[in-house]
Amino acid sequence: MENTKQKTFELSVRSTTEELSAIRDFIRQSISPAGITDEAMDKIILAVDEASTNVVKHAYHYAKDKEIKIQLELKSESCVVTITDFGDSFDPNEIPQPNMKQYLEEKRVGGLGLYLMRTLMDEVQYTSYDGKYNKLVLIKKISA
Amino acid sequence: MSEFFTNLKENGTVNIVELGGYLDAHTAPQLENVFSDLIKSKRFNVVVNFEQLNYISSAGLGVFMAFIETMRENSGDIKLAAMKPNVYNIFDLLGFPLLYEIFNSENEAIDKFIKQ
């Protein structure tokens, strides 16, 4: 009965990579009781890690005293994670999907986070609200 | 809490880097330092033993990308070994097996260097 109820969990952390382990623990603890497969849980955790790392690097440029807000919603058929930052925005549509073969041949470093998020999750939506804050929504379908 | 650690061993001309814990954007610089030190001391044959590594993100993968060329230009290599399935899956997802030799065990990776 409880499984069909929507549940929401929230976390607010400082904008530093030191918080990544706390972010991963938060995701794991929030979704563990939902009976999601380990494989799906690993994918969600990695996608949120990549998203948070991008916020630290690209939205806040490593300034440590800013805020990252993470909201996780467990719905009957999906897990929805929303990452909010108050830093610089970007347009993910302007970042092309890398050609991985070419990428590897050029041995480029970095820039894999968004590619991983798109590969690991069913939906990735990014919205910038008038230069005030940005929201990245990651959606993973889960079997009921 | 020790969330990431590295340990360096030698076997003849091969340098073995053991990894453990969580390799992410916070801990990746520790591994970068290990590779930088290896290059400074001109040790270019490297086996990375992943047996105790529980987790890797793209920041961790980037470290291997950053150093592979230098090792190969100096007739060395970075060979990867003993990954847990969840860690291997991330390498595989990004097509890394095309670029790196990945072995089931540390010994197999060392043998490959010796036979080269």
Image (cartoon, helix red, strand yellow):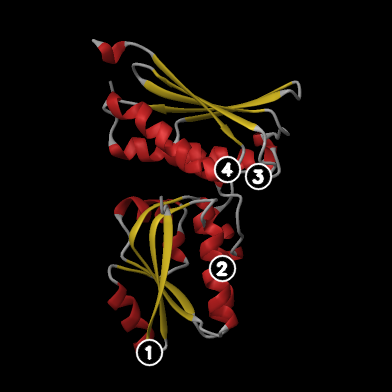
Report how far apart the C-alphas of labels 3 and 2 lie in the structure: 20 Å
Q: Is residue A5 left or right of residue A97?
A: left
Q: Quadrant of the C terminus of chain A?
A: top left
Residue carrying label 3: A57
Relative to the observer, which residue lies in front, A46 or B2? B2
At x 39%, y 88%, the residue is B116
Protein chain holding label 3: A
Marks 1 and 2 belong to one chain? yes
- Mark 4, other Cα within 10 Å: few <14 / some 14–19 / many ≥20: many
Residue A128 lies in quadrant: top right
SS category of the residue bearing label 1: loop
Which mark is nearer the camera, 1 or 2?
A: 2
Q: Is residue B53 above or below residue A6?
A: below
Q: Looking at the image, which is closer to me, B28 or B4?
A: B4
Looking at the picture, which amino acid does disc 4 mark?
Answer: Thr
- The chain letter for the residue carrying disc 2 is B
Amino acid carrying label 1: it is Gly
Above or below, comparing residue B9 to residue A105 in the picture: below
For residue A53, the mark is: 4
Q: Are marks 3 and 4 in contact (CB under 8 Å)?
A: yes
Q: Is A13 situated above or below A105?
A: above
In this figure, which residue is indicated by the disc labeled 2? Answer: B33
> Is disc 3 in contact with disc 1, using a CB cutoff of under 8 Å?
no
Q: Residue at x 44, y 68 (%)?
A: B100
Q: Quick one: label 3, few (<14), some, or many (20+) residues within 10 Å? A: some
Residue at point 70% right, 35% down?
A90
Q: Position of residue B103 (x, y in %)?
A: 32, 69
Q: Position of residue A57 (x, y in %)?
A: 65, 44
Q: Count neighbours of disc 2 (C-alpha within 10 A) and say few if under 14, some if 14 to 19, many if 20 or more.
A: few
